[in-house]
Amino acid sequence: MKIVLAGKIDSSNAFDWEEKIREQLAGKEGEPIVLDAAPLEYISSAGLRLILRMKKKFPDIRLINAGPEVYGILETTGFTEIIQVEKAYRAVSVQGCEVIGHGANGTIYRIDQDTVVKVYKEADALHEIQKERQLAKLALILGIPTAISYDVVRVGDNFGSEFEFLNARSLTGILIEEPDRLDWCVHEYVKMLRLIHSTLVPAGKLPDMKETVLSWTGFLQNYLPAQAGEKLVSLVEAVPHNDHMIHGDYHTKNLVLQKDEVLLIDMDTLAVGHPIFELASIFNAYNGFSEIDHTRIERFQGIDRETGLTFWHKCLEEYLETDNENRIREVENKARIIGYTRLIRRAIRRNQMETEEGRKEIEHWKKELIELLRVTDTLLF
């Protein structure tokens, strides 16, 4: 049953509201109750006590469409921890807006010169949005230059996070529009990567990427020869625990230049772990994912394969601080092991075994992975 709360509820009229609500709820014991606060302008402690008395009789109760002022009162008093409260979210349209990025959980649109919105794929994504906002705050506190969403909005049936990006451009956009700045992009990209990997995260604040990768290796046990599967698991298990940050989806669309500052965005994949796990993700973005279908990197990263390969190689060279090709190739091969593991699992879980193209990719990655496992004794570098 829905009950509409309107105007102001305070000590002067709380009793009248209680009588009115009691009449509406007569004979409704046990039913779920929805309090619609869309027309509610203000609620005092007297009104909050009224709702608490209702909750005792009707445990299945929630409040929806709380405007900014009302929600602020409920949040400040701790009321949002007592019953389920849903904010009233401002509606935003992305029709005709420029798509400036794709992430694991959503798409980023430029609304205007100053504003972008990340629209989440899942319709019920409020938990994911709050999680990403918390991760962005954690990263900022730990010294990572990032943007924090200043509002949560409705975009059709989905939710989105709004960010202020005044004349911001992604590094991908710079690579496309100013190819002569490739070396500058590499330098800024690696500088941020080093900052991330040097950032120590308090214990328990972020998930451990090693545990995630071990779940991938467990999945692959049914798809690899026994010896190769066991070797893969043992290599990952031998990687020591590491409490330093990794981004998890580190590519040039997730770095933006705002004025003279490079910012890291799309923080929902933050974790802790050894840098090899990060390098594997980067390898996939610029090489592994498009090894068979060379057009894929342009569709997903916005740059051609040749640029992607050059960018990846230059980044490894600068990150490792060496131009020794043997050393670069050695670390790349370690990254390829984790990269292929992720790609194979992803493809199988997306039913790509059922298509000829998918089977071709999976077999290619498996062949490469098995050969690398045969000649690799450690993932450390």
Image: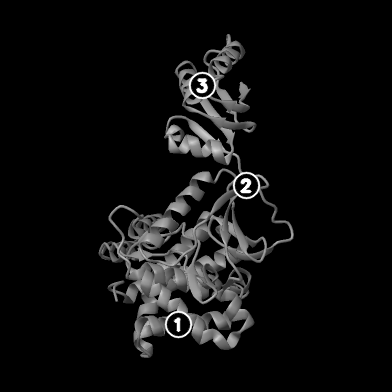
Number of marks in the rendered image: 3
Location of residue 308 with respect to 141 vertically, above or below: below
The disc label shown at residue 158, or none? 2
Q: Quadrant of the C terminus?
A: bottom left
Q: Nearer the viewer, residue 346 or 64?
A: 64
| Nearer-N-terminus badge (1/3) | 3
Left or right, 316 with reference to 91: left
Residue beneath disc 1? 187
Q: Nearer the viewer, residue 271 or 144?
A: 144
Location of residue 20 with respect to 233 vertically, above or below: above
Q: Residues within 10 Å of mark 3 (few under 14, many from 20)?
A: few
Left or right, 353 with reference to 221: right
Question: In the rendered structure, which amino acid carries the disc numbered 2?
Answer: Asn
SS for tag 2? strand
Q: Where is residue 18 in the image (x, y as percent from the top left)?
A: 55, 16
Contact between marks 3 and 2 (CB within 8 A): the answer is no
The disc label shown at residue 96, or none? none
Q: Where is residue 155 in the image (x, y as percent from the top left)?
A: 65, 49
